[in-house]
Amino acid sequence: MNQIYSRQLGILLFIFLLGSALVYVPESVITQDVWVATTLATLVGLYLLYVLLTIQEMHPDLNIMQVAELSMGRIVGKFFNLLFLWGLLMATILLLFDIVLLLQIIYPKVPSTFLTASLVLLSGYTIFKGISSGARLADLYIWLILPLLILGFAVAATLFNPMYIPPVLAKIKPIIGASIYGANWPFGEMIVIALYLPFVIDLKRNKKKLYFWFGLAALVLILRSFMVLGALYPEYLKVARFPFYEIFRLVTFQDFQRIELFFFALFISVGLGAVLIAYNALNLGIRTFFALGGGFSLVFPVGLLIIALMFNSFPSDIKYLANQANSGFLVTLPIYILYPTITLIAAKIKQKLKEKTRN
């Protein structure tokens, strides 16, 4: 049975947000007041969560793509759903690309093709076993992730220098720009959970648990940004590909070096978890778009599609940073925000028209 509880979806949301931006800090493009930018970006995530839950409460048995077609009509709904699928595809590819880059730092001699295929196969197998299997896995993961997070911040605190923290709101325009960037990644990408909501059997009673886990993830990411700013020299922060990971590379305890390897379980757990969640959402979205039943599984064909597009779209880190990192959010963020917003407005209009017809 593909049924999960609000608590489990909340944990999946927590893992997804951390996996998207724990070691990578999107808002670090401004260095100054990076934690302020993260705080502002969380407001977009909070808005999205509210909209997604409202849509689901209006149509408990349907997912957001089905609601879009029901509310806007088949043709218009298909158009918006196609944009949504493209957003899911981009989120999945980018998440996979980032975790492979991180793994290449730890395992520099292992080919990226092998790492990518291994991650996709492992994620695909978990997805093939069903959503409930992934949710039970998250129940176990969280007891590994939380202690390592606490320990990780404690270790990072040993490098913290208050002199690196500039005055709050020192420059307004860069903060707004970084907030928009952070709103896209990871908070805009959390739209992937929309396709999980129909499987939650106690959503109406326990939706507050999703807000709790979202709030906890937001707090961790704000603390991550604050700690990164205080632990790394601002000029170093500008060039660091994975700032939070770099902190652990700089920490040493007497004869213990390469302490970042101790936190490998944390990075791989949240990173792989984020890929798995987005990958499954993309799989569910494709099945919904083409109205496929429970016959042939698309899990591994979709996995091959992800691998092919990732290597074709981002053949190197340099090209990624030169193109997608600087301008991609201008395309994806509107989709992440406008798609659920328009769907909610259309659903409310449709509901009011039905009520008028009945009266």
Image (spheres, rainbow, N blue to C red):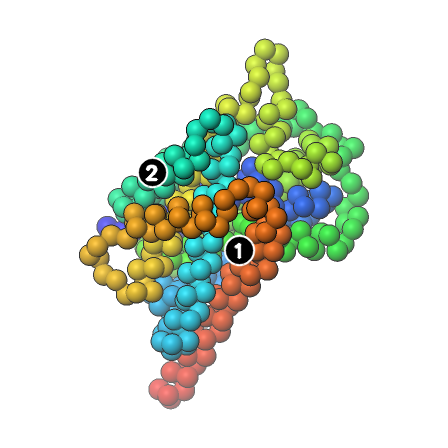
Q: Which residue is mark 2?
A: 122
Q: In screen coordinates, is 141 left or right of 24?
A: left
Give the x, y percent position of residue 253.
61, 15
Q: Residue at x 43, y 81 (%)?
A: 352
Q: Residue at x 50, y 23 (%)?
A: 262
Q: Which residue is mark 1?
A: 188
Residues 52 and 124: in front is 124
Find the distance from the CA under tag 2 to the CA under tag 1.
Answer: 25 Å
* Element class at badge 2: helix
Look at the picture and state if 209 lies above or below 148.
Answer: below
* Element class at badge 1: helix
Residue 164 visible in the snapshot: yes
Residue 5 visible in the snapshot: no
Residues 118 and 223: in front is 118
Q: Residue at x 51, y 63 (%)?
A: 335
Give the x, y percent position of residue 313.
48, 50
Q: Nearer the viewer, mark 2 or mark 1?
A: 2
Mark before the other along the chain sequence, 2 or 1: 2
- For badge 2, the amino acid type reads Leu
Look at the picture and state if 37 lies above or below 71.
Answer: above
- For badge 1, the amino acid type reads Gly
Q: Residue at x 73, y 52 (%)?
A: 174
Give the x, y percent position of residue 219.
58, 43
Residue 273: image quadrant is top left
Give the x, y percent position of residue 70.
36, 74
Residues 219 and 265: in front is 265
User: Label 1: how many residues lie within 10 Å, few (<14), some (14-19) or many (20+)?
Assistant: many
